[in-house]
Image: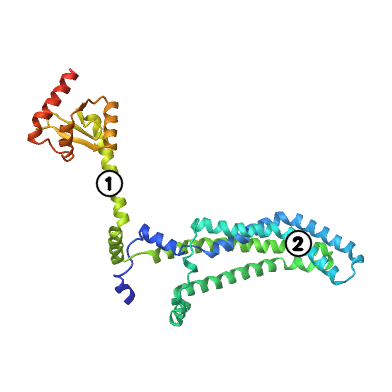
């Protein structure tokens, strides 16, 4: 309670995008280990079912080769080394597909949950973790209790599935004493596969529940107090880079709106290259002409281009253009420029007629 009061109250506010980003940079993401375990067991089981015939065939050939060459084995140190290298090489080739599959599952199960994430912050030394009091608190925290309960439930469920499967096939197992070794091995293989399939189903169910709980837990952890929201807002507003980005975006939007007004102008007064000012006048709704767009250099060139594209007259008058450029956008023409602008508009109207 003291911690909540010091941070501004209870965490009732939804996490902001910045807070989510900060958590992600620290490696604090909603990742369930149960999803990786379930995916690993399920896909390895499916792979093993299809790969088993090829594996046993290759294993039989390997054993036959060893048996044929057993008579020439001299038992020397060089012979033992050669045999060990031969066995390791061949077993590596046989088990390589399984190892590759395990690595692929590990990568894609993480990508499925959290996407691509590379951060070195979790690797940085944190001396606060060496505090025995905090370590004792983490050991008996709610998260540790939940993990313990999950582990116990998982062990109980898996043990129950294995026991019930063996019990249901117990009578059939008694007949194995009168069968060949091959049939006994096949029976054991089928029973083991059945047990693993049921275990995989349980792991998938546990993974789905744990995945949803982990995401919920992370959302609760990322929630913010009202005070934290205010502080983050102040921090965001005070960042010079963010302010400059906001100003740049606002200027760009204002420029686009201004350029969209140019086709409605009655005339564009130019300097002829440095300044360009677009003027609009409607005798029914305006007391005097209004500046609807203006700019210098590159912006002026763009105003002239838009004016030409939309057949807006361009009038070259450097003194008037310089004076008009000092007037704010949307402002009416001052009284001292009435005569000069009136002459320009009259000239434009006569050209149109």
Which residue is situated farthest in the left direction here? 335
- Residue 135 position (above or below residue 282): below
Q: Residue furthest bottom?
A: 132
**In which quadrant is the C terminus drawn?**
top left
Q: Nearer the viewer, residue 132 or 142?
A: 132
Side of 168 where 140 appears, left or right: left
Colour convention of the picture: rainbow
Question: In the image, 232: left or right of 143?
Answer: left
The front one of 105 and 288 is 288
How many numbered tags mark residues here?
2
Q: Nearer the viewer, residue 57 or 231?
A: 231
**Could you tell me which residue is drawn at 24 percent across and 26 percent down?**
312
Disc 1 element: helix
- Spot occupied by residue 141 in the image (x, y as percentages of width and height): 45, 76
List x then y, in percent, for residue 167: 69, 69
Badge 2 or badge 1: first in the primary sequence: 2
In the current view of this chain or complex, which residue is farthest to the top?
A: 353
Tell whether 51 sits left or right of 270.
Answer: right
Say if mark 2 contacts mark 1, CB within 8 Å: no
Give the residue pinned by disc 2. Answer: 91
The location of residue 115, given as percent across then percent down, is 50, 56
Residue ID for mark 1: 250
């Amino acid at each position: 309670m003291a911690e909540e009061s010091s941070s501004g109250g209870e965490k009732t506010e939804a996490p902001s995008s910045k807070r989510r980003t900060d958590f992600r940079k620290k490696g604090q993401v909603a990742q369930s280990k149960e999803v990786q375990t379930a995916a690993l067991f399920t896909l390895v089981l499916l792979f093993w079912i299809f790969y088993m015939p090829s594996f046993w065939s290759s294993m039989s050939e390997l054993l036959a080769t060893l048996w044929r060459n057993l008579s020439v084995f001299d038992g020397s140190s060089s012979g033992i080394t050669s045999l060990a290298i031969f066995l390791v090489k061949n077993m590596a080739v046989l088990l390589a597909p399984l190892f590759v599959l395990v690595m692929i599952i590990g990568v894609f199960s993480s990508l499925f949950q959290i996407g691509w994430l590379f951060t070195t912050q979790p690797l940085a030394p944190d001396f606060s973790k060496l505090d025995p009091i905090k370590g004792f608190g983490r050991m008996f925290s709610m998260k540790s209790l939940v993990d313990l309960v999950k582990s116990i439930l998982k062990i109980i469920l898996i043990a129950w599935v294995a026991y019930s499967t063996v019990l249901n096939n117990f009578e059939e197992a008694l007949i194995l004493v009168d069968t060949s070794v091959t049939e006994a091995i096949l029976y054991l293989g089928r029973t083991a596969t059945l047990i693993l399939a049921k275990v995989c189903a349980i792991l998938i169910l546990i993974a789905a529940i744990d995945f949803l709980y982990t995401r919920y837990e992370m959302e609760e952890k990322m929630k913010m107090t009202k005070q934290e929201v205010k502080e983050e807002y102040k921090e965001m507003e005070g960042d010079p880079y963010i302010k400059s980005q906001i100003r740049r975006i606002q200027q760009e939007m204002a420029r686009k709106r201004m350029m969209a007004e140019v086709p409605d102008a009655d005339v564009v007064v130019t300097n002829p290259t440095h300044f360009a000012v677009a003027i609009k006048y409607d005798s029914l709704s305006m007391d005097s002409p209004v500046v609807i767009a203006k700019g210098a250099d590159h912006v002026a060139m763009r105003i002239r281009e838009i004016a030409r594209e939309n057949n807006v007259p361009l009038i070259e008058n450097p003194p008037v253009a310089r004076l008009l450029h000092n007037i704010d956008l949307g402002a009416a023409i001052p009284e001292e420029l009435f005569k000069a602008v009136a002459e320009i508009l009259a000239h434009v109207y006569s050209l149109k007629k």
